[in-house]
Amino acid sequence: MATCTFNVPDLNASGDNLYGPKICSQPFIDWAWNAFDFDKGDWDDGFGWDAVCDNRQPLSRTMSGIWCLTYSAENYQNESYDSNILQWGCRFARNAIDELDGRCGSAGKIAWTQWGPFIDNKTELYLSYFAQAVSLRAGTLVHEARHADGRGHDAGDRDSSWGYNGAWRWQVCWLSWFASAGTRTSTAMKTLARQRANNILNSDFVVHPGFNV
Amino acid sequence: MPRKSDKKNCACEVTGDGLGVEPGRRLYDQDATAWLVGEGVRHMNAADAEGELAYVRVLELLRKTEEAASTIARVASIAPAEDISLRWSLLYLLADLEEARGLDVFLATALEAVPARSRENRGCESARDGEILVRTMAIEGLGRLASSDKHALHALFEVIERQAEPALRIEAVKAVLSVAPDQVDRLREILPEDLRFAVDIKKVRAEVLDVDFDSKAVDKVRRTPSLDKTAITTPQSGCGPCC
C-alpha cells in the first residue's frame, strides 16, 4: 500500500466545477458504482469514498469522467452498437472493464489495465488521471476499456496502424465524436478533446493514419 | 457515499492506497486584471447561455486592458506545473483574446522542450501527453494570430525548425497551411524526410471516423439512468400537520 498527495488542480479549468454538480445524484452514483465495479477498499483512505460529491477528490473526479462518457450524446439512451462511439462508448467501457481502482501510481502515469486468463482483471487509475480535464478522463476510459476487452498495443506503447483497430483508434474516435457532437459540455472541453485526438494521431501510430480532425 | 450491498465491500478484503488532498493555490488575487483572468477561466467551461455570455463579456473587458497578455503570462508562470488543464486554459483564453501581444507567450510556450519519456512513466498515456497538449494550444494560438500577423507566421516556422517533438511540428505545419497554403514548398524544404507527410495530412470530420466493433463483452448492468429522473431532487417530506 502506497501513500501519496493529490494537489487539487484548478476546478474550473479541469471542468470539475461543470461536471461535479452533475454527478452528485444518488441514482447515478449507485449505477456507476455498480456498472464499473468499484470497491470501497480501492476508493477509501482519501480517494473519496466518503465524499463522492467532493470534486477535489479522486472518486468524484472519476465519476465526472464516467458522466461525460455516459451523457455526452444528445440522445444518450440510444446505446446501440450500430450507432457511433459517442452513443455506445459508455456501454462498451462498463461491459469491458472488470473493475476500476484508484491508486497513487508513479511518475505521471495515467492509467493501466491488466487482462487475461487466470489473472485479476482490473483497471487502475492514477493521480495524473484525476488531474486530467474531464473530457480526457472519459477518453482514457475508452482506451483502457479496449485493453480490458483484450486488445493490447502491437508496437510498444503505440499501435502499428489505424487498421490495427487498437486502443488509440478507439480513443481518437471517441474524442473526435465528442469534439464534434458532444452535448452538455463546454466549447473548451471539446477543443481540448480535438487537440488530444490529433496529438494521438500524430504520435501514437507507427504508420501515420494520414488525417487529423 | 456509494451504497452497495456487494459483500466485497463489507468484508474489507480490498486494501488500496492512502491519499492526502492538498487544496490549490489562489492565483488571481494580485490585481483586477488577474481577477478578470480568473473569471475567464471560470466561465470558459460554461455549458449554458448565461455562462457563455459571461465568458464573452470577460473577453471584452480583457481586450480593453493593456496588460491582458502579460497578466496571463504572469499567472501561467506561477501556476503549478502539474496543473496541465489550467496552463492549457490560460493559453485558450489568450487565444480567444486574439491579442497580438500574446505572440511572445505562445512562441515561448510552443518552443519549450517536451520532457523526455522516462522509463518509469512508460505506459499508454502519461503526464508528458499533457505537456504536448499545452504546447499544442500555444501553436493554435499562433495559428489564430497568423491570419492577420506575419510575425505569427514566422513564429510558426520557428516552431517547425526548433521544436523537437514531431507531434508539435505537425501542429505548426497544419497551422501554417491553414493560413498560407502557398508555403507548402518551403515547408517541404525545411521538414526532415520522415515528417514531410505532414503537408499532406487531410482534415476529416469526426463523422467519418469509426472503429471495427469486434467486442464480445456482454451487457452486465441495467441501462443508463435517465437524466430526467436523476436531475430532480425534491424534499422527501412526509405528511405535515396541515394535511
Image (cartoon, coloured by chain):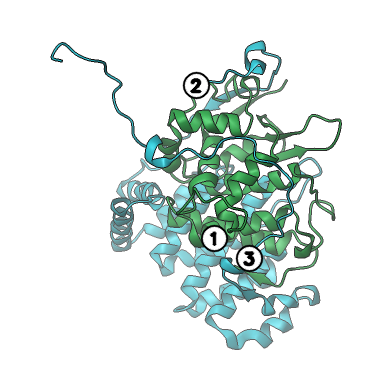
In the image, residue A206 sits, relative to residue A80, either above or below, namely below
* Chain of the residue where label 2 is placed in the rendered structure: B
- Whether labels 2 and 3 share one chain: yes
Report which colour depicts chain B.
cyan
Amino acid residing under circle 2: Met
Secondary element under disc 2, as helix, strand or loop, is loop
* Chain of the residue where label 1 is placed in the rendered structure: B
* Disc assigned to residue A33: none
Question: Where is mark 3, residue-wise?
Answer: B209
Please state the horizontal and vertical placement of residue B5, each as a whole percent of the image. 58, 17
Q: Residues within 10 Å of mark 1 (few under 14, many from 20)?
A: many
Q: CA distance from mark 2 to mark 3?
A: 39 Å
Secondary element under disc 1, as helix, strand or loop, is helix
In the image, which lettered chain appears green? A
Amino acid residing under circle 1: Met
A114 on left or right of B145: right
* Disc assigned to residue B137: 1
- Quadrant position of residue A41: top right
Q: Residue at x 79, y 57 (%)?
A: A159
Give whichever of B29, B139 is nearer the camera: B139
- Quadrant position of residue B10: top right
Question: Where is mark 2, residue-wise?
Answer: B1
Please state the horizontal and vertical placement of residue A11, each as a whole percent of the image. 45, 39
Q: Residues within 10 Å of mark 3 (few under 14, many from 20)?
A: some
B142 on left or right of B100: right
Can you say which quadrant of the picture contains the C terminus of chain B? Answer: top left
